[in-house]
Amino acid sequence: MPGHVLYFQRLAMFAERAPATSTGGPRDAVADFFTPPADGPAAMRYGVLIEVEEYWQSLGVLWGELLYSISLTPGDEAKLAVLDGRWRREAEGRERPLQILARMVGTSMLGDLVTALRPELQLDPLTLAEPNLEAAVFDTVQMIRDRTERMSQALRRRPLGVVDAHADTPPGGAIRTVRNTTRDRLVTFHFFEPLERFKVMVRSPRVRPVIFVPFRLPNVATPDVVRRFGYIFRRTLLDRGLLPDLDRLLGGDEPRGGASTVRLLEHVESNLLYYSTAIIAAGDAAARHAALAKLRDPMNRPLTDVIENAVVGRMGAAIALPLRSSAQLPPEWREPLAAYQARPLRAGDGFVVTIPHPGVWVSAQAHEAMQRQAESHEAAG
């Protein structure tokens, strides 16, 4: 059975060096991707993108904790409600348990795993004061393992139960009906937690050089901007429950200042950094190149001569752009990167993770025929 591959990324920014090491290039270049300026200038910084691939191979399913048992006489039936609080969002119904667990370990730069423009999951960025890339990569691999184990345990700790179905059964509970179809046997139905075990192997992590380019934080929470970039908002909307509000705004069905528009714009305003990054990363590549072409890197080279025109992440109010080669880095970081790429970190033997599946599994246990059981009781009496 083929396995699954999960992709994780972590940005590492190189700490600011003392002014004596500066090459004299401009340190206050800020990309203005939008018309209205906002924040003051900041400096470009160099760093790396740590890329980790995990290969998940299923070791098979297994029965978990016994949740509930009920015995039925011949012809009887029972309706039971399965209260599964492990999968809380409607979107999770479209995802595999493995995808949901991965999203608990890392976050997508643009949208969730169903709508994301990129499959990589982002981990918390870090700042490197010393050029020890192997230690940073090892820390990243260990972080993924620790989080994966913790999140799998957290999933299992979420409430899961089976109760008799009544009129006041909480909404969202799935109704399961069990029936004893035998003629002369008592049948006990057991409800179990469904689980699956995986062997997780980490492939040798890669490290790529990047440059962090600060950008002016604009006000994208306006009807005009949302309409202009509606195709991006539709794919990257954090709260999928606001899709009807977005459709009304894009379709012109909502009067100016209507309640749904206000609700949508308040959401965008509270996530300005996220949506600004989404527009820059997923917007028109030519427009992005035009904005970047006005800048020079810290070594006074045209920025577009040393970068790839793609956004691989964000750290604060700065987007991360891949450098075309490690030769674009300052010497004090160029050598450590070359040394790591020559001898990348070797992953360990892997680890085993157990994760739950939605719902419950049911097994039926038929007992001895009731007539024979009664005769044996009489003989014993």
Image: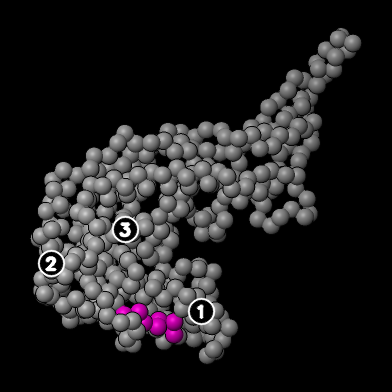
Mark 1 or mark 2: whose residue is earlier in sequence: 2
Query: Magenta stretch: dominant SS?
Result: loop
- Mark 3: few/some/many CA within 10 Å (<14, 14-19, 20+): some
What's the amino acid at mark 3? Answer: Leu
Report the span colored magenta: 216-222
- Residue located beneath label 3 in the image: 126
Percent of width and height locating residue 94: 49, 55
Quadrant placement of the C terminus: top right
Q: Amino acid at mark 2?
A: Thr
Q: Is residue 260 above or below residue 87?
A: below
Tell me the residue at 27%/50% (across/down).
136
Quadrant in the picture for residue 333: bottom left
- The residue shown at (76%, 41%) is 78
Q: Quadrant of the N terminus?
A: top left
First along the sequence among labels 3 and 1: 3
Residue found farthest to the top: 379
Label at residue 217:
none
Residue depth check, mark 3 versus mark 2: number of the one nearer the observer: 2
Q: Where 74 sits versus 201, above or below?
A: above
Report which quarter residue 76 is drawn in. top right
Q: Which residue type does callout 1 highlight?
A: Glu
Check the image and report above or below for 38 versus 6.
below
For the residues carrying marks 3 and 1, which lies nearer the camera in this image? Answer: 3
Q: Which residue is mark 1?
A: 266
- Residue 347, position in %: x, y? 27, 39
